[in-house]
Image (cartoon, rainbow, N blue to C red):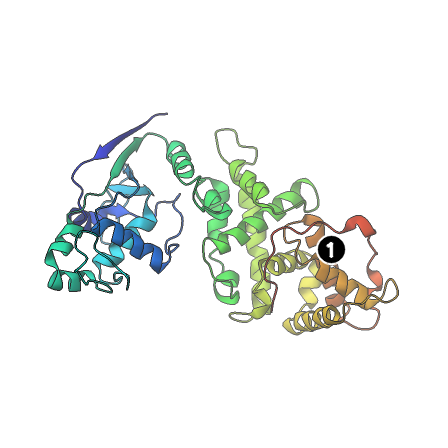
Amino acid sequence: MRIRTALLDEITLLRFNRLRSVVNLDPPYQREGGIWSTDTRRTLIDSIINGLDIPKLYFEANSSHNLNADGLTYQYSVIDGKQRLEAVISFLDNELALDDKFIFFEDLSVSAAGMTLDELDQQYPLLARRFLEYQLPIVRVESDSDDLIEEMFQRLNASSSLNAAERRNSLSGPTKKAANELAEHDLLKESSPIRNARYKYRELAAKFLAIEHQFDVLGHVTDTKAATLYKLFQDTRGESPRITSDRMERYFSQASGLLRSMRPVFQEDDRLLASIGTVVVYYLSFRKANFSRVVSRDALVRFESARREAGARDERKDPGQEIDYLIEYNSLVQSTNDGAALMRRSEILVAFVENEGGPAWYEQLVEVEEDFFPEMDDIESDSV
């Protein structure tokens, strides 16, 4: 495996604007766009017009002959610099304006605050030309290994706010393929109100695959933490993977079938699916055949109402009473990735639904030891 780098000369913003249709901003390892705020984008444009240096961009020289929407072959794929290029493109397209407090350091009499590029060209053509003639610091990268490109992407982003899902997305392989396909399921795209920012649907899909793998190997769920999911992606890579592509395909089929059985129970943009942790609990519950036969949306709504009413009272009665189990469920909500907590929440939900929330619905539950309760991990919004 080898990798080579060299600076690309004379790529001005004007030239980039002409070439941008053959620059792929979304190669498989790349993170989502739209991460930067408007203020951050404006700061970059300010820096360019004022002649300040900006960090290098890294372009992979394409050899795969991938085509864009117009049938043109991509010449480059962006390894690092996507957010900067999005900011530049939005200014080139007059979708972004200069900050209301913009100052041109070389001439304080310039009053270009709030202007788009077209307005700048009309009022201050020299400044517009200054922007368009700015040379982008681009490093051209060539490699005969996708793994090296992915490694470079991760290292370049090691000091940035690359989240766990984005790190997983940079790893090609059967797990990524399965997670990406599951993330397109109607249950997530149509029924869940969770905004699919920074790979939230792929995060859920990875959790489902991890659950299937853990049940297959261990018979129970250990956890769905970031490190566990990352290892799942790694374990299907290489010439002798720990998890074969056939096994991952089986996990995908099981998860896909389960999501298909869940879909009719929920409405479009269903508030019941507003929490990642709760979606995972529903997933675990639907793995039980009897639950999937008897469950209804009304039953889930009744459970939510009952456990929230218990939370409002938040006072334990005699051990083994209904409110105790509902309060126990609530206490586990913030342990979103702990396997024992997720499975216990599922047990309580299943008991309630299978017994229609009737008197003594909780009698089939076994009380847990006092030291059972796990520590809180990723705190999430569990509101409905």
Is residue 133 shown above or below 103?
above
The residue lying at 16 percent from left, 39 percent from top is: 10
Is 379 situated left or right of 63 in this image? right
Between 64 and 83, the one nearer to me in the picture? 83
Residue 65 position, x and y percent, is 26, 41
Image quadrant of residue 64? top left
Look at the image and tell me in which quarter the C terminus lies. bottom right
Horizontal and vertical percent position of residue 116: 21, 63
Can I make out residue 351 in this image? no
In this rendering, position of residue 97 left or right of residue 374: left
Image position of 356 (left or right of 198)? right
Question: Which percent across, then down, holds residue 363?
Answer: 85, 63
Quarter occupied by residue 6: top left
Q: Is mark 1 on a helix, strand or loop?
A: helix
What residue do we see at 76% from left, 71% from top? 313
Q: Quadrant of residue 120?
A: bottom left
**Residue position marked by numbered label 1 in the rendering:** 344
Q: Looking at numbered disc 1 in the image, what kind of residue is underneath it?
A: Arg
Q: Is residue 367 above or below residue 168?
A: below
Give the farthest residue toward the right: 318
